[in-house]
Amino acid sequence: MVVRRPPGRRAQILAVAADRFHRSGYHQVSMTEVAAGVGITAPALYRHFRGKPELLDRTLRLGLDALADGLRGARSTAEVGAALAAVAVAHRPLGTLVQRDARLLPSARRAALRRELRADIALMTAVLRAERPELDEPDAQLLCWSALSACAGLSYQSAAPQPRRAEALLRELVAAVLAVRLDGTAPDALPEPPEPRSRARREELLAAAVRLFHRHGFDNVSTDRLGAAVGISGPSVYRHFDSKAHLLAASLVRSRERLWHEVDGAIAAAEGPERALAAGLRGYVGFALRNGDYLGAMLSETERLAPPDRRAAVDFRRDFLRTWVELLRGVRPEQDAAAARIRVHALFALVNDGVRNRPHSDRPDLGDCLLRLGRAVLGVA
């Protein structure tokens, strides 16, 4: 007897896998868990996909193909915005998977993914420059990358927003980003906190850990490599931290403390909602320019933390988000909490990507550009 597979089974598997990877992180999800979510056995799952790397690759492929298809048909920036918004809503996990988990793919697939994203940006840039011929190529590309990042911010919302409303607001955000003027931007002059006169070895290790974990991934950084980064042997790392996992947790805690101190301090020192929001935005952009490795590690390595540390990190993100949502609604009271959350997530994604996305991250005026883009997505330009 021939056993026929239910129609659409591969699509079911990919949908469940995307959701699980999105919520828990690639490393925390097993093939058995994906199979259970579909209602099949693990051996049955392996008849469709050879392993978890292929499953991740195919979930990414599904969203990226939809993005490319939408952009190939766009003939105006309004149509670009419609394509970006539609994919962001229909494939909500895509932003997280691209920014956090895609680096775990084999190098050839990572390179192919990057080429595909660049091709998408080229399509967007051509449309944008046709409407705004005064833009040079680098400025147009920065605006297009920023619009893509702003839409990807929807991926970080813990609860799915109402689809039609989210899509409409994202189209509005894309239009605002693509309309930003970058002429007359000034070299970065954002305030920097004073550097400590001396740094203890423990603090040096925390800084090195954030940098190495972000750039290479937790599993690919040995204690020997961590020790070498600060001029000590690998075993000497254990004089300061019980384990590599403890070092990861401590490094993220230290970075969160600095982020809160700098940004919340700037907000608290300002008078009135408008000035507080402006000060917070300047504080966040300034922090991001100096701490891109932390923002990257926070995104990519939080799921590797032990459960208590992971909960603390998630609680911090929730509190930080709530502060910004309340701040934005103080300036724009007509915005309800759902709309404000979409805008704030768009801001964070835009800034976090902007400071790490070369070659734009090397722009001497990047801080000024991000401030203008940030005001656009917040709707306070």
Image (spheres, rainbow, N blue to C red):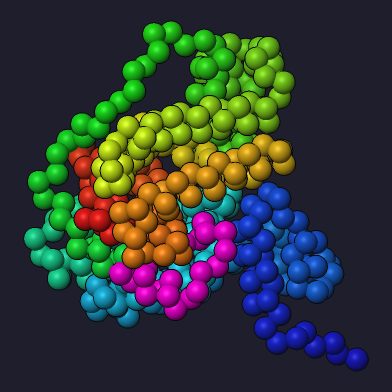
Residue occupying image coordinates x 64% and y 23%: 223
Residue occupying image coordinates x 42% and y 53%: 325
Coordinates of residue 360 in the picture (x, y in percent): 28, 45
**Residue 54 lies in what quarter of the image?**
bottom right
**Residue 331 lies in what quarter of the image?**
bottom left
Coordinates of residue 84 in the picture (x, y in percent): 38, 70
Residue occupying image coordinates x 55% and y 41%: 316
Coordinates of residue 305 in the picture (x, y in percent): 67, 38
> Which residue occupies the foreground of this view, 128 or 160?
160
Residue 316 appears in the picture as rendered: yes
Q: Is residue 169 magenta?
A: yes
Residue lying at the far bottom in this picture: please name it: 1
| 208 horizontally vs 240: left or right | left
| 232 horizontally vs 339: left or right | right
Coordinates of residue 273 in the picture (x, y in percent): 30, 47
> Which residue occupies the foreground of this view, 99 or 200?
200
Residue occupying image coordinates x 13% and y 66%: 132
* Quadrant of image for the C terminus: bottom left
Q: Which residues are magenta?
A: 146-172
Residue 370 appears in the picture as rendered: no
| 281 horizontally vs 65: left or right | left
Helix, strand or loop for the magenta stretch, by majority: helix
Q: Is 11 rendered above or below residue 342?
A: below
Residue lying at the far right in this picture: please name it: 1
Q: Is 340 rendered above or below residue 249?
A: below
Q: Is residue 317 magenta?
A: no
| 333 horizontally vs 304: left or right | left
